[in-house]
Amino acid sequence: MWAARYEVGDVLRYSRASKETGIGKGEYARVSAVDAAGNRLTVELKDGSEQTYDPRRQQGVSVYREEERAFSVGDRVQLTAPARELGVANRELGTITSIGAEKRIALKMEDGRQIEFHAAKHPHLDHGYAVTSHSSQGQTAARVLVHVDTELGAKDLLNNRMAYVAISRGAHDAQLFTNDRETLPLALGHVVSHQSAHAPQVNLEKGLAAKPSEVKQQFVHGLSM
C-alpha cells in the first residue's frame, strides 16, 4: 500500500486486474520510479509502457527481487509463485531431475508428479533446502533444523504460532538453533491469536510460558518427538 516500501528494480506480479490502471490479471511490471512523499509508484510494463498509480488503489500485488541462482540436477527447489498451467501452488517443493539445453527444467514434486517448464517463462524458482516457517505449513519432513534469532528486527514474527508450526514439521526429530536460549522462551511464548474452543492444548506453548530457568529441561524434552 505504501510506495516507500518499494525499490526501483522490484518485479511486480498482479493477481487482480484494475480498470483504473489498466493492468491485467497475471501481468508483470518492473518498478521504475518511487515517489514516497506523494505515495505514487511508476512501473514499466512488458510492452515498454509506463503506468503511475497510488499503490493503495491496486490490490493483489506480489513483489519480487530478481537474483541469479545456480541449479544442478538433484537440487531440492521451491516454486515461489503459483502456476495454474503447471498445476502447482506457491512454495511447493520438488527435486530437479533434468536441465535441458533450451533452459527447460524438469522437476519431480514431493507428491511424485512430474512437471516441466521453461526457465524464462516461469522464473519463480529458488533453492528449497531452507524455507520460512510460514512456507512450511502443511509440509512434513523426517527431521527439521529451526533457526530462531531473538534479535530479529521484526519481533512480531517470533510467537507461539511460529514455534508450533516450525517444530511440528519434523516427524522424527526437531533441533532448535538460537543466539540466546535465555530469552528464547519469552520470544516464542508470545501469543498472537486466541485459541479455538475445540482446539487441543499444545504442550509446547505451556512449556514456553515457564520461567527461563525452568524451560531448559522442559523445552529440550518438548522437542524430543
Image (cartoon, helix red, strand yellow):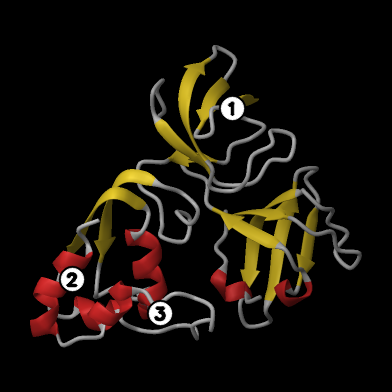
Task: Name the quadrant containing residue 58.
Answer: bottom right
Q: In this view, does 117 lie above or below 1?
A: above
Q: Which of 51 and 225 is in front in this view?
A: 225
- How packed mark 1 is, by other alpha carbons closer than 10 Å (few <14, some 14-19, many 20 or more), is few
Q: Is residue 205 above or below residue 96?
A: below
Q: In this view, does 77 lie above or below 65?
A: above
Residue 52: image x %, image y %? 77, 66
Which residue shows up at 36% across the image and 74% down it? Answer: 202
Q: What residue type is labelled 1?
A: Arg
Residue 44: image x %, image y %? 72, 53
Q: Is residue 123 above or below residue 114?
A: below
**Secondary structure type for disc 2:** helix
- How packed mark 2 is, by other alpha carbons closer than 10 Å (few <14, some 14-19, many 20 or more), is many
- How packed mark 3 is, by other alpha carbons closer than 10 Å (few <14, some 14-19, many 20 or more), is few
Q: Which amino acid does label 3 sit on?
A: Asp
Q: Earlier in the sequence, mark 2 or mark 3?
A: 3
Q: Is residue 101 in sight in this rendering?
A: yes
Q: Nearer the viewer, residue 142 or 116?
A: 142
Tags 2 and 1 touching, CB below 8 Å: no
Name the front one of labels 2 and 3. Answer: 2
Which residue shows up at 57% across the image and 66% down it? Answer: 6
Which residue shows up at 25% across the image and 56% down it? Answer: 225
Residue 189: image x %, image y %? 30, 81
- Give the number of the disc on residue 156: 3
- The residue labelled by disc 1 is 113
Q: What residue type is labelled 2?
A: Phe
**Secondary structure type for disc 1:** loop
Q: Which of marks 2 and 1 is nearer the N terminus?
A: 1
Question: Whole-Å distance between the Cαs marked 1 and 3?
Answer: 36 Å
Tags 2 and 3 touching, CB below 8 Å: no
- The residue labelled by disc 2 is 219
Question: Whole-Å distance between the Cαs marked 2 and 3?
Answer: 21 Å
